[in-house]
Image (cartoon, rainbow, N blue to C red):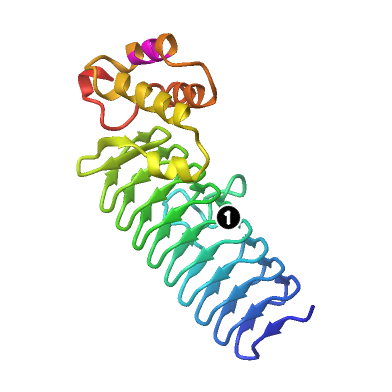
Amino acid sequence: MANNISKLAHVGASAKIGDNVTIHPFAYIDDNVEIGDGCEIMSYTSIVRGTRIGKNNKIYQGSIIGADPQDFRWKGEDSYCYIGDNNVIREHVIINRGITSEGGTRLGNNSFIMADSHIGHDSHIGDNCVLGNGVLIAGDAEVDNCTILSSGVMLHENSRVGEWVLIKGGCRITGNVPPYVIMAHNPASYFGVNAIILRKGGFTEEQIDNIAKAYRHIYQTGTSVFNALRRIEADVTEGTVRDHITDFIRNVNLKIVAIPRDLE
């Protein structure tokens, strides 16, 4: 199908534009950019060199995708930003590229990024995520699939957030948030299992009960994370959700948020 590219938009000579793409007036598409089929780029949006955008994305006014990384380690070399399929990126969102030619910043598929959010260099956002208004994600962070960061959440560099997590508005996260939980307040504290969203996602009541039992051992028994994991493996029915919790915590070297320092 034919594209609808305004004569008032700038499209770089080496940019690759897919089929059925709409680019509105005053959008800026740099050289060395790829935009997949069915995308819509609204006015005053900038798509900067090194950006690779998949299919059926809608990017709203004033956003900058693939902005230069804000890191002193970047010395001007080519680097990349990868956007998957079927994402909505609202007004004034900034997504930085990576700082080297390897890796790069990545946004998965089917996510909704609300206005004024920022995703730093080399961070990875999974599929089916929601970032509320004004969410700030520093560099080298990771947000797993099906996670919601409510408005005003700040995620520190090198932090990881597991899948199916809900972080309530205004939380500042410095560290690793394990899967399936709700975090709230400042400093961040465990606020229970994300049960409502898990039910909507097809989790069974037995799975949710096992998740709750696991996190009682971690957050409510006053024991160390190491001992809590041993109790979980002895007390919680073996299965995907149990293993996902224990694997996540071991992969981050038992360092998770909302644990008293003497129990880490």
- Residue ranking furthest to the right: 1
Task: For residue 101, say whether it is visible.
Answer: yes
Q: Position of residue 40 (x, y in %)?
A: 61, 75
Image quadrant holding the N terminus, namely bottom right
Q: Residue at x 69, y 76 (%)?
A: 21
Residue 233 appears in which quarter of the rendering? Answer: top left
Q: Position of residue 256 (x, y in %)?
A: 34, 29
Count of marks overlaid on the render: 1
Q: Main secondary structure of the magenta part?
A: helix
Q: Position of residue 133 (x, y in %)?
A: 35, 63
Q: Residue at x 46, y 41 (%)?
A: 199
**Residue nearer the viewer, 229 or 21:** 229
Classify 10 Å Cα crowding around label 1: few (below 14), some (14-19), many (20 and above).
few
For the magenta stretch, what is the residue range?
228-232
Q: Residue at x 73, y 81 (%)?
A: 3
**Residue nearer the viewer, 120 or 3:** 3
Task: For residue 157, say whether it is visible.
Answer: no
**Residue nearer the viewer, 245 or 235:** 235
Tell me the amino acid under the disc marked 1.
Glu
Is 212 a magenta residue?
no
Looking at the rendered structure, the secondary structure element under dot 1 is loop
Residue at numbered disc 1: 77
Q: Report whether 79 appears left or right of 183.
A: right
- Work out whether 65 lies above or below 205: below
Q: Position of residue 52 (x, y in %)?
A: 64, 60
- Work out whether 88 lies above or below 120: below
